[in-house]
Image: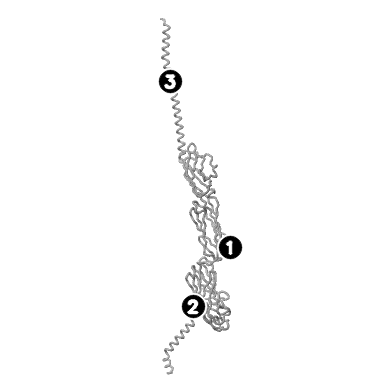
Amino acid sequence: MKTKPHRLCAIGILLLVLILPAAVAAADSSSTSSTGSSTSSTSSTSTSSSTGSTSTTDAASLVYVSNVTMDPGELYPYEEGTITITLENGGSTAVGLTDPTIISSRVHIVNEDDWKTMTYIGAGSTISYSFRITADAPDGTDFALFTVGTKGGGSVHFPLVIRVSSEGIRACISVKPDSFTPSADEAVNLSIANPRDGEVKNLLITPSGDGIAVSPSEKYIGSLDAENTVDVPFTVTAGHAGNLTFHVSYEIGDSPHTTDVVLPITFGEDKTAAVPVLNNVALTSKGSYFDLTGDITNAGITDAKGLVVSVGSPAAGTGTYPQYAIGSLASDDSGSFELTFSAGDLSSVPVLLSWKDSAGDDYTEEKVLDLSSSAGNAPAGAGTGSTASGTGTTGTGGSASFSGAGGPPDMGGMGGPGGSGGPQGSGTSLFSVKGGGISSFYPLIAGGVLCGAGIVLWKKRKWLSQKLKRQ
């Protein structure tokens, strides 16, 4: 059977209608799958990038300032100091740090270019930045800000308090005598105070003065903490008056500073020294020599140690007591002495007193017994009295009146001042109203014995008369 041509065309068209929708659907499906895959890939990439960025930020946030130190603790205006800032990484990954600096209108970094490179701080590690800085005047407190950037993250900030002061140390003489004694050792203390908020270092004290010896010759102190003081003792021995200068050098940070303290050296009477006073002085002729007795009282504040009494020229010690050692004589205490000496001229008899103070310094004082004031230059004739005076390193001695009789064996005429007697005569002279020595009471004792005997005889006169009549 023969098929007609128009039927074949209809069948072909039907097949095309059935095939084309399937092809289109397949093409759409393929396109949709490809697009979804691309979208998924893009989304994945974006998430990964976002996660990496968060990790870097978290690591930087765990870097913090753990310590700040300043040297000096308080800056001196326009002088260099050092501030050291330590950072610690509390995270588990390394962090890059860059451009550390200090932000302030008054504080300036001297070595800012030292930290221009990137520096990494490892996990659990620390890193320190040391800045050499200066601060402008005036004195006061500056509130600065330390800042450092991090790689891939933010910055680390930390506030700083920086103090500025132009005040130096203060030094003064805290211990000194009221006046100095020539060639005597005197105690002097130098007090140094640090009023600053930071320590000062390398203090060196050097005393100097013309004709003045100081021990120790210099004194070194390593450091003096903030708001602290120190006393430095010295022993000063002055040969003559003048100025003693204590030169004090020290450092604030690494910058040198100096100050001077001047102590005037003046000589005068030491108000705390021992003051020996002669009392109850008695002079007796013993034929070929004289005997001098008396008491010494210490009217001063300090003790007279190793007190020795002797006579000076023109008298010369001889006999039993050419000099007399009393020993230590405390303040307000007294002691007796006896001297034996010879003298061709009794117009004056110097009595020398020698002792030491607690520091071992020697003192000598001379008490001159002037016997010529009423008898003229020659020790002959009668006299009514005289005075005893003294001078020495610690001042002038007192005076006492005397009266008596007798003269030295080599004198002719009427004897010594205030009495009578031949060349071999003897007598007693009292140098005070109280008298002194048992010998000064011999006339009174003899008179008393005679008076007693007379009274007994008077009372027994009848009995004696009867006895005589019986005989």
Amino acid at circle 1: Gly
Residue 448's mark? Answer: none
Which residue in the structure is indicated by mark 2? 433
- Residue 310 seen in this snapshot: no
- Residue 35 seen in this snapshot: yes
Q: Quadrant of residue 344?
A: bottom right
Amino acid at circle 2: Val
| SS at badge 3 | helix
Distance from label 2 to label 3 (Cα)? 152 Å
Q: How is the image coloured?
A: one colour
| SS at badge 2 | loop
Q: Quadrant of residue 393?
A: bottom right
Q: Position of residue 176 (x, y in %)?
A: 52, 62
Which residue in the structure is indicated by mark 1? 211
Distance from label 1 to label 2 (Cα)? 47 Å
388 up-or-down from 142: above or below: below
Instruction: Indicate which disc, 1 or 2, sits on the residue closer to the N terminus.
Output: 1
| Mark in front: 1 vs 2 | 2
455 up-or-down from 152: above or below: below
Which residue in the structure is indicated by mark 3? 28
Q: Residue furthest top?
A: 1
Instruction: Indicate which disc, 2 or 3, sits on the residue closer to the N terminus.
Output: 3
Between 89 and 186, the residue placed more toward the observer is 186
Q: Position of residue 409 (x, y in %)?
A: 56, 81
338 up-or-down from 203: above or below: below
Q: Residue furthest front?
A: 138
382 up-or-down from 354: above or below: below
Amino acid at circle 3: Asp
Residue neighbourhood size for the residue with mark 1, other residues' Cα within 10 Å, grouped as few (<14), some (14–19), many (≥20): some
Q: Position of residue 149 (x, y in %)?
A: 49, 39
Distance from label 3 to label 1 (Cα)? 118 Å
